[in-house]
Amino acid sequence: QQQYAPAPGTDIRYNPELVSNLKSDHKQLLEIYGEIKRAHDKKDYQLVAQKLRDFRNLFNGHILTENVRLYVYLDRALNKDPVNAAIIQDFKQEMNGIGMAVHNFLKKYDSIGESTELAFTFGKEFAAIGEVLVTRVGHEENVLYPLYAPYY
């Protein structure tokens, strides 16, 4: 297997499978989102709670991978390219905000299986989270991920 140079000032090397793994996470997150929606539509709040936990676990792992493997690498590898460096910083800041909003949403609805009064506000907030995620996934896959390349 080819050994790539690490990004400057790090031990983080290009991983040719990283983008496909992140895209796979996106696909799984959107699938779980759909499962949550179907469970909510059936008023199966126990299943909603279970699927929210699945979503949280995958989302948190995805965010950590992006923060460590992608953003740090891109920040260091493209630090001499001010335009792309600014794009990367914007993506990172936006994702931090989205990550916090998703975290707060998941925390708020963690007990939806035991507290059905949460069901009254869940649908609207869940739809808003979904819109943000779909938009974000598109931006990452079409704008951010193409910047990820071996550092030489």
Image (cartoon, grey):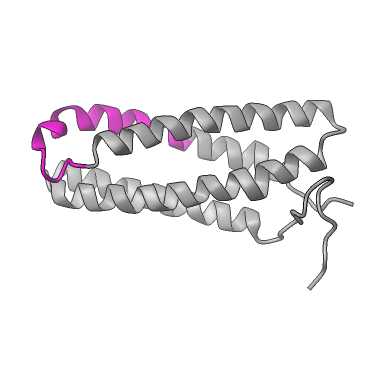
Residue 30 % position (x, y): 40, 47
Q: Is residue 112 left or right of residue 3?
A: left
Residue depicted at 87% across the width and 33% down the height:
80
In the rendered view, tell whether residue 12 sits above or below residue 63. Answer: below
**The magenta stretch spans which residues?**
111-134
Residue depicted at 46% across the width and 35% down the height:
99
Residue depicted at 82% across the width and 69% down the height:
2
What number of labels is visible?
0
Magenta stretch encompasses residue 105: no
In the rendered view, tell whether residue 97 sits above or below residue 60. Answer: above
Residue 104 % position (x, y): 35, 32
Q: Quadrant of residue 28?
A: bottom left
Q: Is residue 4 left or right of residue 54?
A: right
- Identify the main secondary structure in magenta: helix
In the rendered view, tell whether residue 75 sits above or below residue 17. Answer: above
Image quadrant holding the N terminus, namely bottom right
Residue 65 % position (x, y): 58, 50
Q: Quadrant of residue 72?
A: top right
Pick the front one: 10 or 112: 10
Q: Is residue 91 left or right of residue 52?
A: right
Residue 31 % position (x, y): 37, 52
- View extreme (right): residue: 152
